[in-house]
């Protein structure tokens, strides 16, 4: 009986040893590859953060096209941006309000490479540090800057064929040396926007109705860019300067509309021809000082901003009835000259005190 027990004990110990050896060999197997996926979208209590640098969509795109595919951001006419559930969307760049007018801002975004953007913040509940109404939302565009010493850049050239040929080109540079950082972009574009309109008021079966239809052609030449500089004074304070510029020239912009008026069965026809020549210049400067006051992220923010906007234009509006462009049928003619010059300077100061357990208190004021 004893020899059988001895053989059984040897068999089980050999089996246990083989299993342990197999497990040990599995533990020492080499790791061939590790795949780490970075989160592109992150939801916070007051905003949605889109990490553009981690998204492949940014390649070959511009800032405006990128915003159109950003969650919660809507654009239906390729000219304006809105946030779902908000009356207006106010554009901020690097945490500071853009002072460009609507047209200049759209062209600026369309000519800014998406590769220059680090992240986009869609802020639905703005705090007191933002100068907006409670019903407004904020799109904060954070531009890239080098974190280590060196220089890099990119060149972007685009040619597209629509009804007319459209071209654009731009160059961007990022530089950092020690505590000093600089990022800049200059771009230019030339395009002709063509749209067909059909405007109806009332119904053709009603007693009174109007209908206007025709083409609008708007040629544009643009030149603009930005310059951002920052300097780290010490571990707790930072000084930053931001300059944005956009210049536009739109000569020989035309609108040609054919009008039909129905009045109690009687039909009246006319033609409206408009021509506009305009040029505009938009330059804004922003100086910012930031001081961190504790380890919880409390900070003091002081900001000075200046805006200079100029627009010079003249237009003519002629109506012909019958609808033939001939001086004989000219029924009304309006000539307008509309110069506009705006100079604005503003001061903003705010302090945010952070406490433990995710509680914060913010106070601030501004003067224009």
Image (cartoon, rainbow, N blue to C red):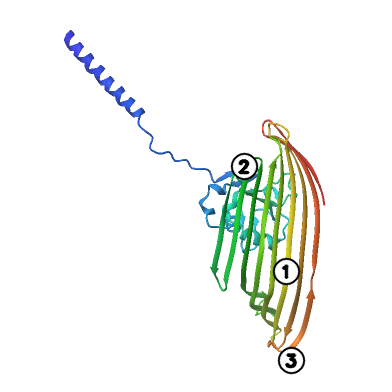
Mark 2 and mark 3: Cα distance apart in space: 66 Å
Residue hosting label 1: 279
Foreground: disc 1 or disc 2: 1
- The image shows residue 171, relative to residue 8, as above or below, that is below
Residue hosting label 3: 328
Does residue 65 show up?
Answer: yes
Question: Splitting the image into 4 quarters, where does residue 18 fall?
Answer: top left
Q: Considering the image in quadrants, where does the N terminus appear?
A: top left
Mark 3 and mark 1: Cα distance apart in space: 32 Å
Mark 3 or mark 1: whose residue is earlier in sequence: 1
The x and y percentages for residue 31 are 38, 35
Mark 1 and mark 2: Cα distance apart in space: 42 Å
Residue nearest the viewer, comparing 26 with 6: 26
Count of picture labels: 3
Residue hosting label 2: 44
For mark 1, give the secondary structure. Answer: strand
The x and y percentages for residue 10 are 22, 15
In the rendered structure, the answer to whether residue 182 lies left or right of residue 16 reads: right
């Amino acid at each position: 009986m004893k020899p059988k027990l001895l053989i059984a004990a040897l068999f089980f110990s050999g089996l246990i040893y083989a299993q342990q050896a197999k497990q040990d060999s599995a533990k020492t197997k080499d790791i061939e590859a590790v795949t780490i996926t970075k989160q592109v979208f992150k939801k916070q209590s007051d905003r949605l953060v889109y990490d553009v640098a981690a998204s492949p969509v940014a390649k070959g795109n511009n800032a405006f096209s990128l915003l159109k595919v950003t969650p919660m951001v809507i654009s239906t006419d390729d000219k304006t941006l809105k946030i779902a559930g908000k009356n207006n969307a106010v554009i901020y760049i690097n945490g500071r309000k853009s002072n460009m007018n609507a047209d200049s801002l759209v062209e600026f975004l369309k000519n800014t490479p998406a590769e220059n953007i680090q992240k986009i913040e869609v802020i639905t509940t703005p705090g007191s540090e933002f100068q907006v109404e409670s019903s407004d939302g904020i799109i904060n565009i954070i531009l890239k800057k080098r974190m280590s010493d060196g220089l890099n850049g990119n060149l972007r050239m685009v040619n597209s064929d629509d009804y007319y040929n459209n071209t654009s080109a731009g160059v961007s540079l990022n530089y950092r040396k020690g505590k000093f950082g600089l990022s800049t972009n200059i771009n230019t574009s030339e395009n002709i926007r063509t749209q067909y309109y059909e405007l109806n008021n009332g119904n053709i079966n009603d007693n009174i109705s109007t209908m206007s239809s025709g083409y609008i052609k708007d040629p544009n030449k643009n030149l603009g860019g930005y310059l951002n500089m920052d300097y780290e004074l010490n571990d707790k304070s930072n000084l930053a300067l931001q300059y944005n510029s956009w210049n536009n020239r739109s000569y020989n912009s035309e609108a040609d509309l054919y009008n039909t008026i129905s009045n109690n069965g009687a039909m009246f026809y006319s033609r409206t021809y408009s021509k506009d020549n305009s040029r505009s210049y938009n330059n804004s400067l922003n100086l910012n000082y930031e001081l961190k006051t504790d380890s919880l992220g409390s900070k003091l923010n002081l900001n000075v901003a200046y805006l200079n906007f100029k627009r010079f234009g003249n237009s003519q509006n002629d109506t012909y009835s019958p609808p033939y462009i001939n001086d004989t049928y000219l029924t009304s003619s309006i000539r307008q000259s509309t110069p506009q010059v705006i100079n604005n300077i503003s001061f903003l100061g705010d302090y945010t005190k952070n406490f433990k357990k995710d509680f914060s208190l913010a106070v601030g004021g501004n003067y224009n």
